[in-house]
Amino acid sequence: MTTQPTSRPPEAVYIHIPFCTNKCFYCDFNSYVLKDQPVMDYLRALDREMELTVQNTPPGVIKTIFVGGGTPTVLKPDEMAYFLKSIRTHFPDWDDNIEFSMEANPGTTDPDKLAVMKDGGVNRVSFGVQAFQNELLTGIGRIHDVDDVYRSLENARAAGLHNLSIDLMFGLPNQTVAMLGESIRKALELDLPHYSIYSLKVEENTLFHTMFNKNKLPLPNEEDELEMYLLLMSSMKAAGYDQYEISNFAKPGMESRHNITYWHNEDYYGLGAGAHGYVKRQRHVNIKGVNPYIEATSKGLPQLDSYPISQLEAMEDFMMVGLRLREGVSNTAFQAQFGQTLEDVFAKSLDKMVHAGLLEHIGGIYRLSNQGVLFGNDVFGEFVGALTEV
C-alpha cells in the first residue's frame, strides 16, 4: 500500500553544485575539488536535467530554491550567471515571497559574484564559517580564515543581501567549551537573522575517519560536548533566537523555509549530481560523479535509482523528520496526509517516549522535551522500523 501522491507539484527546488576549492577533513558530501573539472559541461547538463524534469512534472509556483554543494560560490561570475538563468528559464513562476538560498564559503564571494547572484534572484546566503579560531579552521581543512568571514559578510550586505546565515560546528578536534563560547559570542555580534550549529560527525571515507581509527583525532569528551550543546542553546535563547529545529536558530519569521519543507516531509525537486528528490511519493537519487552525471544527462534523466515510498515508510519518515522541529508533529497534519491519527499508528512508541520524558504531548501535538532535545537520535530511532509489526 502506498500513500496517495499529492495533487500539487513540488514548490521547492534543491540544486547541487558539486565543486569546491578543496575537500575538508570531515566532509563526506558528494563534492569534488574544482581544479580541471568540466564546470560548463556540468552546468549545461544541469540545464538539460531541469528541462527534462519539468517536462515530466511541470512546476507550479516555486516558493523556495536551495543551491547546495560542494561550494556553489566557486563558480565564476559568468558561470554563475548562466546557471541562474537556467533556473529562471525552467522554473519561471516564482512566489512573490520566494526564498532563494545559496551556500557559500567565506573567501569565495567577491563583490562581482555577489552582484550576479543578487541579479539572478538569490536573496539568502548561508556561509560555512564553522569556527572563529584560525587554528581550528586549519585543523579541519577549511581554506578561509576569520578575516574572510567578516569581509564576505560585508560584501554580501554591500550587494544588498541581508538574509544571511552562518554555520558553526562543535565537537571539533582540539576545541574547548571556551572556544565554542567565543565563536558563539562573535557570531551573535554579527546580528544575523539565522544560525545553524552542528556537532561534528566522523563519517567514513574522510580524513578524520582515518585519523580516528588510528587514535589520532583529539576530540572533546562526551561531557564537554554536552556542555557545548547546552551552552549554545542557552546563548542563543538569551540573544532572542528561537531554536526552531534541533540544530537551527532564527529570529522570529526568519527560519529556513526550504529546510522546513524537508522536515515537514513535503515534495521537492532534486537536481544535480548525487541529488535526491521526492515527488508524488516517489524518491529518486541521481548519479554521483561529475562526468558520469554529464554523460547520463545526454541520454535522459540522470537517475541512478527511483522507487515508491510505501505508506509505512512515509509515516516513519513523517515522524523522524518532523520531530526534529521544536514545534513537533501534529495529529492534524498526520491525519491530512495519512487518514489516521498518530495514536492509531504509533501508540506504543509515543507512549514509551512520553513516559521516558523525551516527548511531550500537548493537545494534538507531540514534540521533543528539553531532555529529548539532548537525546534526539534515540527518539528518532524509536520510529525507525516501528511499523514492521503493524
Image (cartoon, helix red, strand yellow):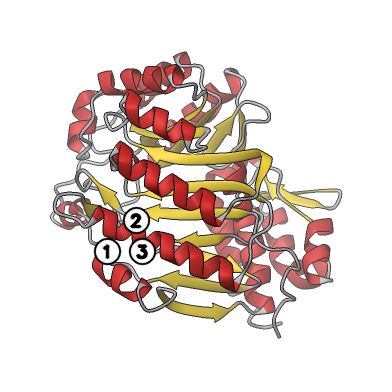
Instruction: Please state, as top left, top right, bottom left or bottom right, where the N terminus lies in the image.
Output: bottom right
Q: Amino acid at mark 1?
A: Val
Q: Secondary structure at mark 2?
A: helix
| Residue 331 position in % (x across, y down) | 82, 58
Q: Mark 3, mark 1: which one is toward the viewer?
A: 3
Question: Disc 2 and disc 3: Cα gap in Å?
Answer: 5 Å
User: Taking 251 as reference, is 303 above or below it?
Assistant: below
Task: Check disc 3 and give the amino acid type.
Answer: Ala
Q: Are marks 2 and 3 in contact (CB under 8 Å)?
A: yes
Q: Residue at x 32, y 35 (%)?
A: 105
Q: Residue at x 28, y 60 (%)?
A: 41
Residue 88 can be seen, yes or no: yes
Please provide percent x and percent y for residue 83: 40, 48
Task: Tell me residue 113's x, y (percent).
Answer: 34, 31
The residue wearing badge 2 is: 43
Taking the spot 37% from the left edge, 72% from the top edge, the residue there is: 297
Q: Closest to the observer: 267 or 349? A: 267
Instruction: Write down the residue under mark 3.
Output: 45
Q: Give the residue number, with chain letter if any, for mark 1.
A: 290
